[in-house]
Image: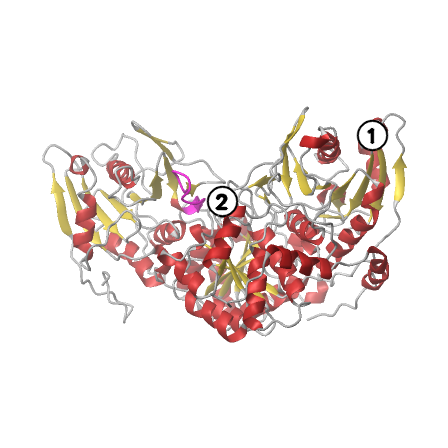
Amino acid sequence: MGLFNFSTHNPVMTNKIFTYSENPHKDGKVLVLSLGGLGIERPTEDLNFNLRESLDLVPYLKDEAGRIDCLALSQKDSADLTSFEIADIAKTIKDYQNDYDGFVVIGGMDVAAYYTCATAFALRGLGAPVIFTGATQSARDPDSDFRLNLPNAIKVSLMGAKDVNAPSVGEVAILFDDSLTRATVATNRGTRSNNPILSPRVPKIGDVGWTVKISSHAVPRKPSQVNYSYNTNVNVAYFDLVSETHLGSFEQLVTDDTIQGIIIGAFGAGNCPAKLIPLIYRAVYEKAKLIGVITNCKKGSSDMGLYDVGAVAVKAGAISLGPMVKPAAIEKMRYALSNAQGEDKFRKLQDASRLLLTAVAEEIPDTFSRHMVNNTRDQFIKTAPTLDSFFKPQEDQAFSNDIKTYCKSKTSKYKILTISLGGTFFQEPNLEGVLAPTKKTLQELFDVKLKGIDRLTSLDYLELVNIDSSNMEHRYRAQLARVIAKNIDKYDGVVVLHGTDTLAYTAAAISYMLVGIDKDVILTGAQKPGFGSSDFDRNFVKSIKAIFARLEQPKESRAKAGVKVAFGDKLMIGTTVVKEDEHGINAFAPIEKHPLAGTLSHHVEIIDILDGVKKRPFNLFTGFNQKVAYFECISAVDIKQFESYVESDDISAILVGGYDEANMPMQMKYYIATAVNSYHKPICIIATTDNGVAEIALDKRRGEFIKAGGIALGDMIKESAYQKLCFALGIASQQKKMDGRERLEFIRKIMHTNLTGEISDKYCSKGDQVYKGIFTDRVFTDEFIQEAINNVRESFEKDESSAKQDSTPEKSTKR
């Protein structure tokens, strides 16, 4: 039983506050609330008893305060917390705000960034410290971080309680390991590090060590002026863009009348593909839904006035949320929709947008907040612009197959082919002052940037297309792969120039299209336009040097070739790279669970991280099935949103972005089972945290999702997993004499086959062991998978005719 009975919206207490300790030699009175989490043991159904027993495992805890009172609100996995259980954290603190000097809340880490934000928005103006903490190990373990985190959290919650001049914290924060982080700017990096809480966009508010050092930008204690609200709105969806987003899954959110608001995790600076614009317009100006946009990069901000692909989304009614992080954006929208008022749906939408953009708990800068509130003051209550007044459907570009020679070197034996698809490096301000593809030629850019390149290499180039990478589609990638396959034998390597927003998706896609390629194909681009001071020339030349550095290694110890990404000071393989920084020059990195393939400075170092990857014959395959939807778990999600994906005839498979270790709400296992058993629809699962892994094991909670039929993908990342699932579905569609369950196992085996370094071999082995008999008794070997790939291999000559067919522009239609 939890603290409240949720049969009504007025909670009824069933547990009582108890005094854990009193120490006459100490000052300060603190209330410790518990939601559960790894730190709290559960030997009984008595939640307060469990809490007391766990606190008893923390040495010297009673020395931290004059009085420690406690109350167990619930004890469950944080992934299963309901909106009511989360809202009751703030309600309890509000009810006892005058009785304690500070508050500490113990909870699970998976959705900590969400429920801490929700508490901050519900208690705006409280002025007292509310310090959340937790653990990555049970309190019973002698080396548990719970034994360190909890005493430090109590210490911070009492700072300045008796001395107004002493350093203090008067806001909602998260204390973990050595850091004190503002709740509304926090994200979860995963529990494979001592501190799973990260503040990627602003500095933390305190350092925790022998003493606690509070930063100057922390909000200090102040008299309470709490403006409390009980926010339980679950009618908010999160839609994270993947390259060539499955439009049908977004359209479901637009047409679902229960959904009142959508947060879009957009590319880069808040950039949205053109095909999404009519749906955004429809959601806002026909359905009166609140649409907020954040960057889905770890660092940076949604700056939607920078690129044309962002500016047009604003005209369609989307609201830029600047540097707001995902958990804060989702909880802020819930807060806004819970409190918005208006005589009709558009006046309510207008008020909700005001609340969404008004800074409440330091989640966005005050200057940005005031600017955006003024800019959107009457946006939704005046006559809406017509869609065709600002938007024209993107015209499909014909491919160019004209490879040109830029220079022939008299001093270098090497020859490089450069293929350009467009991107920031090849953009200039348009008439409205936002960046859009340039009308200039690639040769003009080379003439400005690459003087003397003939001393390094002979260089040919092809301007395949020139588009903003937010609008990158499969057919462009397929043609890129065909051109590379046809011409690779004529060159020592290929450099692909690409926009940064979807570069990681293209790198992953062509890695699978060109499995077994024995020369380097390196993708790069720039964060600044090439016609000006830019990182373009450095990134381009370093890409070429990386190709040569590998070739100059001794043949017997030479690093494996393949599809890679060179950007800033890093070289990465194409299936483990993410764009983590919307703004910075070093925008790309392999997240913590994957290593670098090299470093790029005045000296280029190549690291053979593909040494253990099986050598495979070179194949070209572009027949991906693109009916794959991506669903990312958020706290207190309405599970019907996932159900609609399962039931959709337009979706062939779903990639689920789970929490750390790919945890998710337990309810989802029933819908996973339905997808697998009723529709033979593959459900693949990844962990979305930086160092999280979708563990492949049948024990604990994770085993429940695997038993239901979910395919856990180990250490694969979203970009690579998405493209590989499209690849696997495409190959599976060519197989004969397979029933539905055999097809599921065939796809599972492909996903658990290390083709290009995308997944560690240990997870492939675990997959074969754990999934034995789950889908079928039939066993597919690595040799069978390789033969299946060989059998769908496309010929390069045949490809020319299909390329011509693909290059014919399709007629665009308006929604």
**Image quadrant for the C terminus?**
bottom right
The residue singled out by tag 2 in the image is: 690
**Image quadrant for the N terminus?**
bottom left
In this rendered view, identify the residue nearer to me: 232 or 775: 775
Is 807 placed above or below 217 here? Answer: below
Kind of element beneath mark 1: helix
In this rendered view, identify the residue nearer to me: 210 or 620: 620
Asked whether, in this view, residue 193 is left or right of residue 85, the answer is right
Label whose residue precedes the other's in the sequence (2 or 1): 1
Q: Quadrant of residue 341?
A: bottom left
Task: Report the residue at 31% width, 41% height from top.
Answer: 170
Task: Report the residue at 38% width, 38% height from top.
Answer: 194
Using the rendered image of the protein, determine whether residue 364 is visible from the camera's viewpoint.
yes
Marks 2,1: beta carbons within 8 A: no
Q: Amino acid at mark 1?
A: Ile
Using the rendered image of the protein, determine whether residue 638 is visible from the camera's viewpoint.
no
Is 222 placed above or below 684 here? Answer: above
Q: What colouring does the structure picture have?
A: secondary structure
Place of residue 286 in the rendered image (x, y in percent of width and height, measured from the top left)? 58, 71
Residue extent of the magenta highlight:
184-196
How many numbered marks have been drawn onto this rendered protein structure? 2
Kind of element beneath mark 2: loop
Q: Quadrant of residue 251?
A: bottom right
| Real-space Cα separation, disc 2 to disc 1, in angstroms | 38 Å
Place of residue 43 in the rendered image (x, y in percent of width and height, measured from the top left)? 20, 54
In this rendered view, identify the residue nearer to me: 766 or 369: 766
Place of residue 717 in the rendered image (x, y in percent of width and height, measured from the top left)? 55, 49
| Residue neighbourhood size for the residue with mark 1, other residues' Cα within 10 Å, grouped as few (<14), some (14–19), many (≥20) | some
The residue singled out by tag 1 in the image is: 453
Residue 783 highlighted magenta (yes or no): no
Determine the main secondary structure of the stretch shown in magenta.
loop
Q: Amino acid at mark 2?
A: Asp
